Amino acid sequence: MPSPERDTEDLQRRLESLEASVRALSNEVHRLRADRAAPPIPAPRPTQPAAAHSHAVPSADRSDSWVPAQIDFESLIGRYGTLILSTVSALAAVGLFLNWAIEKGFLGPQQRLGLGLIAAVGLAVAGLRLRRTERSFGASLLGLSLAVTLVCAWGAGPALGLVPDWAAFALAAVTSVALAVFAHAEEDEPLWSVGFVGAAIAPFITANGRSNLILLAAYGVAVLGSAGYAMNARRWLVAGRLFLLVALLYTATLATAREAEGGPLLAMGFPLAAALVGVLPWSRGWARRERLRALGVLSAMGAVRSGFGTQHPLDALPVALMIAGAGVLWMVLADRTHLVRDALPAGHRRSHEGDWLDAGVLPLGFALAALAALDASANSSGWFMAAAGVVLLVSVMRAPLGNFRDAAAFATFICALLAELLLLQGRGSAFVASLAVLAASAFAANRLWRSGSWTTLGLIGLAGAFLMSFVQLSERPAYAYTPFLTESSAVALVVLAALVASMSLAAGDRRLVSVLRGGCLAWAFLWVHQEIAFAMNPTASTLFRVTYYAATAVGAVWIGRARGVPVLRHVGLGLAIVAAGAALYGARDLQAIGARIGAALVAAAFLMAIAYWYRRRGTRTAVGSQMSA
């Protein structure tokens, strides 16, 4: 028989097994309840072929904001803003300490410099240790140590005088390059940001009011060049903004510096130099285009500042040529950038305004700055603007069809117009004729390089020539000129020829041809009217005018009926009424009774011809109703 102890052990094992089963069952029930309460996970949607979405608008085109939607401003400020501000504060503390020590004389120059280098070494050691556990913050301390080293290097020259300025610049540049290489290899944006800001502001922290502007500009270019290498083509948001802010800082400093030392001229060249060494070799695509555009704006601002300077170390002509050279360099950079077709990155939209800025606004800014440097009121300055127009025309020839070409065409036309204004000052008739020729040339250019700017500006130019020529015809002394043989008559003929030429060049665009054809007819009528309205004497001019109105009315009605153009028929009937009014009312002041009778007979004869046409059997009106005799 089994012993009681064995039965007890067997019962205990069964109870433990039962408890485990109940526990497992309970866990399973809880899991099922949790799954039932959780929201269902949607099944992944099948991937559609690219062709199925060809009609959809890409997300880049739907974005109307220049701020990417995925930016977390709290994280941006917490991770980068505070770090950069702490760097600036730390470097400011070092700079204040050096300046305070200099004023009080507590330490010698060597001791003060040594303290700064000891602080840099301490930061570097702390950064290297922290990188094992906190890589990002440790990298920031390393960048700060290099920035302190840059402050010490720059201060050793201009501030303390321990080494020549060029030696301090060389040491600072080498340190900056080392920082860029390290950040590039580590691919660490915080490290780059801290070190770059420190390198950039080092000359300003140790500034003593006697800095060499050329040395400062060269140092800034070196810093931006190494920074561009460190960024490479990475989409670092904070780094890109800091790069442009530093470029703005140096440009503004140089632009507001002394003109006699070439500060504004250096401000014009500094952004372009930074673009050549810090953007072109290291970036591509839209990142390159955006950075180049910002640097181009800074250079144009420096060019305008230089154009209005009065105490440059060079004469006016060399300054103007330097500004023009900067403008040509910018156009080359823009040309190289826009000839490459790049896909839009996610979250971006195509900026048509940027194309106009690159090819239109900035080139015009450089051209006008060069004009201001010369003499904006001198006739000879017109040749300078003509040369600018030729250079811009080359840009039009190379530009692809689109906004970039439209902007270049606009700038070309404006430069040509300014050249005419300057070269033909005081010669009103010659300017009106040249304006008409320029407008017709715009239509000719449109045949070669299609652009809406050509036709738009051409129409505006023709309208301006139309109005100015009419004013010149009206300002001639009454009854004291020979019709069609004055200088104003010759200008009017040039305007008419330009209108006719433009109409033939616009063949293929029906709406444009219709507008130009109407302009030709209107100008031809007004020109002849002004020639005979005050010709010879009041009697002859009245007879000429009545005959002209009547004959034009008959011609308009005849052409309108033959071609089926209702507008011409309506114009002809209106002119017929005007002719009758001129014959019956306008001729009443004539002294000679024969002239009054003759005017009435002429009007009657032409009006009778019109009435005969409209009353002939089978003639139809515009609405198609039958008219019988």
Image (cartoon, rainbow, N blue to C red):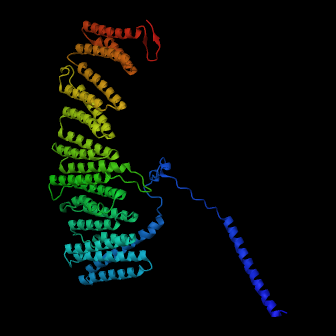
Is residue 235 visible in the rendered image? The answer is yes
Q: Report which quarter residue 173 is drawn in.
A: bottom left
Q: Report which quarter residue 34 is drawn in.
A: bottom right
Residue drawn where x is 26% and y is 79% of the image:
102
Q: Quadrant of the C terminus?
A: top left
Q: Report which quarter residue 194 is drawn in.
A: bottom left
Q: Nearer the viewer, residue 191 or 491?
A: 191
Relative to 525, say whether 153 is above or below.
Answer: below
Q: Residue 589: horizontal and vertical position, in percent?
A: 28, 12
Q: Nearer the viewer, residue 29 or 116?
A: 29
Q: Residue 411: horizontal and vertical position, in percent?
A: 28, 45
Q: Residue 260: horizontal and vertical position, in percent?
A: 18, 61
Relative to 407, say whether 606 is above or below.
Answer: above
Determine the residue located farthest toward the front in the rendered image: 1
Q: Nearer the viewer, residue 280 or 565?
A: 280
Is residue 578 visible in the rendered image? The answer is no
Determine the residue located farthest toward the right in the rendered image: 1
Left/right placement of residue 84 relative to residue 161 reads right
Residue drawn where x is 40% and y is 51% of the image:
350
Q: Residue 498: horizontal and vertical position, in percent?
A: 25, 30
Q: Nearer the viewer, residue 466 or 477?
A: 466
Residue drawn where x is 39% and y is 64% of the image:
236
Left/right placement of residue 441 relative to residue 611 reads left
